[in-house]
Amino acid sequence: MPIRYNAPDIINDPAWMLFHDEVKRIKSDKGMLILAHNYQSADILEVADITGDSLELAIRAQQATEEIIVVCGVRFMAETAKLLNPDKKVLIPRDDAGCPLADQLTPEMIREAKARYPGAPFVIYVNSTAACKAESDITCTSSNAEEIVRSLPDDLVLFGPDSNLAAFVQRQIPEKKIISVPDGGNCPIHNAITRTAIEEAQMIGGYIVCHPECTPEVSIAADAVVSTGKMKAVIADQKICHVFTETSMLYLLQKAWPDKILYGVDGAVCKDMQKTRAESLLDCITQEISEITIDELHAPRARSAIEKMLALQ
Ligand code: 13P
């Protein structure tokens, strides 16, 4: 059943206030920039310098002047920040915060697909490893996937690892043929949101916004299909909204729009995103642990794939 969202009053919690003051002191002493993905918990979002979706965080990482960048999110986000800042220290509070979607694509799969479709470009979703990005032509995020695929002159485009995002882009650009690699790659959290969730939301009424990692049966039925960074704007004129993505997203939406009635999807929780807690962030910034390193075998080509995407923004 849809869950009516009730935002935690984190900034008035005395324990959070102490945490906040400690983080603020350490980050200003050390000259750190803290980036947090929209799926982080409220306590982390409220101490970050910048919150955003994958694209917004990559753009902000590229512009960073601080010597140490801390990425509260999952590993591929921190790797993106490191690739864009090879001479800076990039830290992740939990180095075991992975992405099950990223794990579904290997460099071999990309090489095989390229051998099967000679000349076809490989567009890689940023939810992927640096080794896979190194085999690809250009990265994309959920925010710009359509734009990136349109920017290519080719009629046939290889796309991975998210087949739901590939199908969404395919519907926007029917004149091109998009081939998913691997066939059926998905984010288990978004993929588990079913048509029943749509029907239950429709019974309550209101506007349905979903992430493009949702299955076609969900995204075709939704009112808007956008990245987490664009959700705030698309619900601007709505009163009751159903938000089909990781539940933590609702905190920033409710903060932006306190009068709206927001519903989340029961159980839509990314365990990897939620590994970052106040203690792990404090340990990370105090001891400067969990530094991201990228194999030099992959780094230059992976960086080039990200930079090509950012040049189009
Ligand atoms: P966004 O870039 O839309 O925030 O999506 C990131 C993500 O990992 C979704 O599962």
Image (spheres, grey):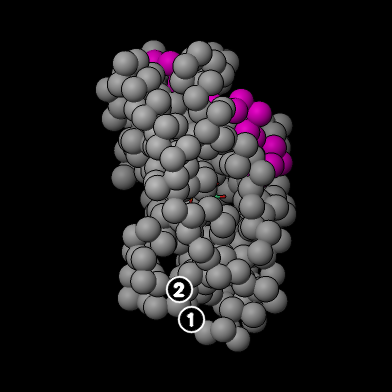
Quadrant into which the C terminus falls: top left
Q: Is 64 situated left or right of 293 in this image? A: left
- Element marked by disc 2: strand
Q: In x, y percent, where is residue 114?
A: 63, 39
How far is the residue under mark 2 from the one under mark 1?
A: 9 Å
Asked if residue 92 shows in the view, the reply is no
Vertical order, 209 against 211 (above or below): below
Look at the magenta stretch and give its main secondary structure. Answer: loop
Label 2 Cα neighbours within 10 Å, binned few <14 / some 14-19 / many ≥20:
some
Q: Tell me what residue is drawn at x 34 percent, y 15 percent.
A: 30
Label 1 is placed on what type of residue?
Answer: Gly
Q: Quadrant of residue 103?
A: top right
Q: In x, y percent, where is residue 227?
A: 46, 56
Quadrant into which the N terminus falls: bottom right
Disc nearer the start of the sequence (2/1): 1
Q: In x, y percent, where is residue 258?
A: 36, 66
- Numbered range of the magenta stretch: 88-105
Residue 206 — which label? 1
Vertical order, 282 against 207 (above or below): above
Q: Tell me what residue is drawn at x 52 percent, y 84 percent.
A: 205
Asked if residue 42 shows in the view, the reply is yes
Q: Name the residue carrying label 2.
A: 261
Mark 2 touching mark 1, by CB under 8 A? Answer: yes
Label 1 Cα neighbours within 10 Å, binned few <14 / some 14-19 / many ≥20:
some
Q: Is 232 situated left or right of 128 in this image? A: left
